[in-house]
Amino acid sequence: MLDWSDPQNFRPTVSAVIPNWHRKDDLREALLAIKAQTYPVSEIIVVDNNSTDGTREMVESEFPEVMFIQSPHNIVIQALNIGAKTAHGDIILHQDNDGVLEPDAVEKMVKVFATDPRIAVVHCKNVYYDTGEVFDPLRWFTPEEHASDGVFDVPTFHGNGAMIRRDVLEEIGYIEPEILLYQFERNISAKAIDRGYRVVYHPAAVIRHKISREVRNPGHRLYITMTGGWWYLARFYPPGRALRKSLAYLVFFVLYTLKYRTFKDFLRGIEDTLLGLPQVLRGRRVLSPETVRFLESKPYETAMIIYGSWDTLRKWVRSWLRKGSEKRG
């Protein structure tokens, strides 16, 4: 059994888990990058959400050593639960199927785990695949910090290119069954931090992400952010604070809906949030005041409003000015 407090003999085993749905060519590149790591990844598990693009055939033909688990339907991020419970490694490396790790990313993150047995999660820097620009929608760090080899405590993490201790996942009960995709990182972080663990960001480790600059499906993204965000607050936060943050979320969701005209998804998100609320409240576990203060040490909901809404308003103003200019011309 691994002794997390013994840095001299620290050699944890690593299992990679990749939830997948279609995009077999991206998955191929992701798997090749994992196999090329300078620190060995002893086990690779692909949990497939019922792809129909030949993904299974590609994996079985080109990567016979990879464990391929086929779900009969799309279970989204619950695939991580299945993969983590199947894995044997001390640490779970989780990434998207369109993420490409730099060759030394795993080695660098493992070294961070060796510095403190309280570290439960280490996540690396996400950069755009094509440009190398840092992906940081919440603006939590300066360019200098992103360019450093520091280790920064954070209230949550980016799930693409994150390494998570498997024993901690077992201790906290993995990901709640109602979570579809967004917010699963916040749920893991809240439970781990409340138990005295640390979640850290190590920008020296890098993963290139093929995430589009534009939302691939804005309606679906709105829906899973609404349900996941409100359920997260209902599960973990004191009532008054949860209500205030829920209203802050509502401002962002309304502006997002107006921007992308996702009115049906907005109404569906409200309806399903309310329908799922009884199940969430049955598993309610209010965080300690100290944990809540730490989780709010870096803004989340307000950052979404400030930056997301500001970006939206700027686009509206530019569009209005452009139309005015065209009319005058």
Image (cartoon, helix red, strand yellow):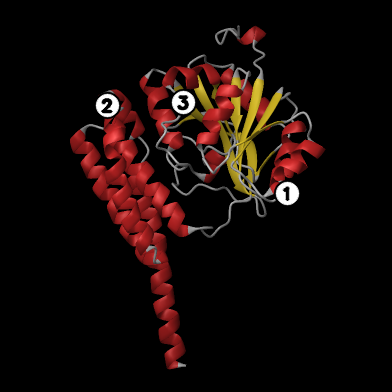
Residue corresponding to mark 1: 25
Foreground of the two, 80 or 329? 80
Query: What type is the residue that disc 3 sits on?
Result: Tyr
- The answer to whether one can see residue 309 in this image is no
Above-or-below relation of 313 to 227? below
Image disc number at residue 240: none
Of helix, strand and loop, which one carries label 3? loop
Q: Residues within 10 Å of mark 2 (few under 14, many from 20)?
A: some
Read off the residue under disc 3.
174
Residue 73: % across, % down:
55, 43
Q: Nearer the viewer, mark 1 or mark 2?
A: 1
**Residue sitting at x 30%, y 29%:** 292
**Residue 309: % across, % down:** 36, 59
The residue beneath circle 2 is 286
Q: Quadrant of residue 283?
A: top left
Extreme-front residue of the structure: 72
Q: From the top left corner, tell me how far across and down residue 261 is, in percent.
A: 39, 67
Cα distance in 3D space between marks 3 and 2: 17 Å
Of pointers 3 and 2, the one earlier in the residue sequence: 3
Q: Residue at x 42, y 23 (%)?
A: 192
What SS does tag 2 mark? loop
**Disc 2 residue type (three-letter):** Val
Question: Label 1: few (<14), some or many (≥20) within 10 Å?
Answer: some
* Residue at x 44%, y 46% (from the top left corner): 138
Q: Quadrant of residue 235?
A: top left
Q: Amino acid at mark 1?
A: Asp
